[in-house]
Image (cartoon, grey):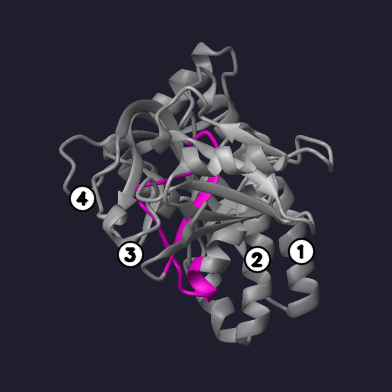
């Protein structure tokens, strides 16, 4: 057997999507690694692939521990090495009586992976040279597959953030944002949604991607109500501890959109795009603190699912560059705060 290259290092980050995304952001934003746009978290082994230089990758595996301590688990942390001939490597291990696990047994040598442990228990993967995207030649960016979906998308923004940024130092502001996004992410995942983007004080999530669902509008609105309720307590604590005033506004829209990986060889992310998404973003911008603004399509979906909301019909929303205005409804809460000073 002859090992030629080190290709990737796999790290298990657990089966919590919020924690996995946080780990991904750490390696990308803090350590400066780039996401491989040709691999994404919807593969057989979920997680994120990050490029490390031109000859190696880091695989953040989003999976629970599924086997005992003595078993060879392909989703356990391991280093992946490329060998000249995977068939020869397999024969060598068998002749030496070294325990191993073969993946892709019925496939071609290019699809086979061998998993084993060293005497100290560290995981090792062996695959054939030239069958991995870890090398620069294998990473040439190709437009990934996308899918047309009918889903519900949500935008949430913190109100008063600009003023808060002036009041707090950077560390305090970072602490506040982490708590804010932690709340929104946790509620989203609890209701079957997927967090798509965190930017500044803005939050984007979708319900019904990548797996479709008939109750996406119900889950999105339920999550939005829970976000407002939980944020009210959080904002009260912030005001008492740091003398800052913050609010939360949410916009929701449902309809057809395109879902998939968008980006380049330097950075990419799974997201949704289209007119439905643009309208949801505008609703999120228009919502005042303590408000949920939804489109007519969301209201119809709630009515059809037997969950007619108590809402107030507002004048249609006119979106610049869009030919037709959008029917708009407000789901009021007990307390709204106007931050338009």
* Residue closer to the observer: 100 or 217: 100
Residue 68 image-quadrant placement: top right
Is residue 30 on the magenta stretch? yes
The answer to whether 177 appears left or right of 317 in the picture is right
Task: Choose mark 4 or mark 2, whichever is in front.
Answer: 2
Residue 242 image-quadrant placement: bottom right
Inspect this view and state whether residue 228 appears. Answer: no
Residue indicated by mark 4: 320
Residue indicated by mark 1: 236
The residue carrying pointer 1 sits among few (fewer than 14), some (14 to 19) or many (20 or more) residues within 10 Å by Cα, namely: some
Residue indicated by mark 3: 266
Residue indicated by mark 2: 178
Residue name at image x 42 percent, y 28 percent: 151
Residue 102 image-quadrant placement: top right
The residue carrying pointer 3 sits among few (fewer than 14), some (14 to 19) or many (20 or more) residues within 10 Å by Cα, namely: few
The Cα–Cα distance between marks 4 and 1, rounded to whole angstroms, is 36 Å
The Cα–Cα distance between marks 4 and 2, rounded to whole angstroms, is 33 Å
């Amino acid at each position: 057997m002859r090992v030629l290259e080190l290709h990737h290092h796999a790290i298990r980050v657990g089966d919590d999507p919020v924690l996995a995304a946080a780990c991904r952001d750490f390696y990308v934003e803090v350590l400066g690694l780039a996401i491989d746009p040709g691999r994404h978290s919807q593969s057989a082994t979920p997680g994120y692939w990050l490029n490390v230089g031109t000859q190696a990758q880091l695989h953040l595996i989003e999976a629970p521990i599924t086997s005992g301590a003595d078993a060879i688990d392909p989703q356990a942390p391991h280093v992946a090495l490329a060998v000249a001939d995977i068939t020869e490597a397999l024969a060598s291990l068998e002749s030496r009586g070294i325990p191993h696990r073969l993946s892709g047994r019925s496939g071609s040598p290019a699809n086979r992976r061998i998993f084993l442990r060293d005497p100290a228990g560290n995981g090792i993967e062996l695959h054939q040279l030239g069958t991995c995207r870890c090398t620069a030649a294998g990473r040439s960016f190709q437009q990934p597959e996308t899918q047309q979906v009918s889903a519900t998308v949500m935008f949430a923004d913190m109100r008063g953030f600009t003023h808060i940024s002036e009041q707090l130092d950077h560390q305090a502001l970072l602490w506040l944002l982490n708590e804010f996004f932690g709340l929104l992410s946790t509620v989203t995942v609890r209701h079957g949604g997927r967090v798509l983007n965190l930017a500044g004080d803005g939050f984007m999530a979708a319900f019904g991607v990548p797996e479709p669902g008939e109750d996406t509008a119900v889950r999105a609105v339920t999550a939005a109500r829970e976000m407002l309720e939980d944020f009210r307590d959080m904002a009260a604590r912030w005001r008492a501890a740091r003398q800052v005033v913050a609010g939360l506004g949410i916009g929701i829209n449902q309809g057809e959109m395109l879902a998939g990986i968008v980006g380049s060889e330097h950075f990419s992310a799974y997201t949704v795009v289209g007119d439905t998404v643009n309208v949801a973003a505008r609703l999120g911008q228009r919502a005042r603190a303590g408000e949920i603004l939804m489109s007519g399509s969301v209201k119809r979906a709630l009515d059809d699912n037997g969950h007619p909301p108590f809402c107030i019909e507002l004048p249609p929303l006119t979106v610049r560059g869009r030919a037709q205005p959008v029917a708009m409804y407000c789901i009021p809460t007990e307390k709204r705060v106007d931050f338009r000073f």
